Amino acid sequence: MRIKAILASSSQELVQSQSANRQAALGAGTKLTIVAPHDCPPSTETEHDELVSAPAIFSEALRAEEEGFDAVTIDCTLDPGLRATQRACRIPVVGAGEAALCLALLLGDRFSVIMPIRESIGPMVAKIRRMGLWQRAASVRAVNLHVLDLGDCQRTLEALVQEGCRAVQEDGAEVIVLGCTAMGPVAGALAERLGIPVVEPGTAALKLAEAFAAPAWRACLSPRPMGEERGESPEPRSADQARQRCRPVGER
């Protein structure tokens, strides 16, 4: 199995820093490729960054399908361009933000997300609300470190411990969701310091993508678009197409 992880960043340093950690989480038969599209900003932290990153991620995902990859992940918790990319691709596309938030629901009643900077809080709150999860959210906090500064693991860990303790003691969090995939290298150490589960979004997305692309699941979780089984040019999936398929034959 081959999975492509698409960063919402043009930084090759981020690619190098994430590769070993990500590959170690996958099965022996899964090969990971991480890419940082040149047209993305150096990091994606704000709504403006999301808008800039989305077209580049969309194009890279379509290229991944053409290259024969089995699944794609969007390696950013803000999930730039996720819905459009999912609808255009015929392979599983998993966003790190959605994957991490969904996993958090299985680990505790209330979760807190810790973002890199305060400007990232608003977009994450909006995402949680769109997913209908706000009642399960204890808080959304920030460590006030830019994404490209998170490579200083000791500094990042101490900042996360400080905000994580506040999330637990003041907000009642039972699970911590890391608000940036670049925080991944310190996830294990943070969980030990806090004594509660810590969800690392990049790995969460990869593990779900790996599962979704497995032959036993792919047929039911990623059905072929309308027309493909008849040899026609497939169209992107949509809710309207699904409703059309489910109408009685005489009414189509």
Image (spheres, rainbow, N blue to C red):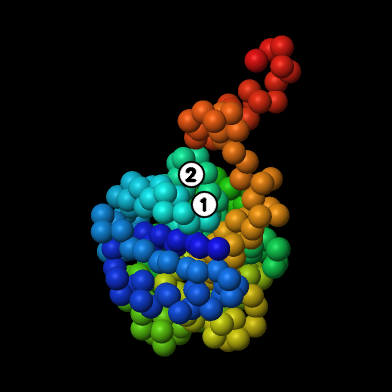
Residue 210: give x, y in percent of width and height: 59, 62
User: Residue 251 occupies which quadrant of the picture?
Assistant: top right
Q: Report the number of numbered marks.
A: 2
Residue extending farthest front:
231
**Image height of 240 relative to 42, above or below:** above
* Residue 82 in the figure: left or right of residue 108: left
Q: Which residue is rendered at x = 62% and y = 55% of the image?
A: 212
Under circle 2, the secondary element is: loop
**Image height of 218 relative to 210, above or below:** above
Tell me, yes or no, if residue 101 can be seen here: no
Q: Which residue is mark 1?
A: 93
Image quadrant where one finds the N terminus: bottom right
Q: Which residue is rendered at x = 50% and y = 62% of the image?
A: 3
* Residue 14 in the figure: left or right of residue 97: left
Task: Identify which residue, 165 or 76, lies in the foreground.
Answer: 76
Residue 122: give x, y in percent of width and height: 43, 54
**Image height of 230 relative to 82, above or below:** above
Q: Residues within 10 Å of mark 1 (few under 14, many from 20)?
A: many
Image quadrant where one finds the C terminus: top right
Q: Which residue is mark 2?
A: 89
Q: Which residue is rendered at x = 36% and y = 59% of the image?
A: 8
Under circle 1, the secondary element is: strand
Q: What is the C-alpha distance between the residues marked 2 and 1?
A: 8 Å
Q: Which residue is rendered at x = 53% and y = 56% of the image?
A: 70
- Which amino acid, by three-letter code, is at mark 2? Cys
Q: Nearer the viewer, mark 2 or mark 1?
A: 2
Task: Identify which residue, 165 or 100, lies in the foreground.
Answer: 100
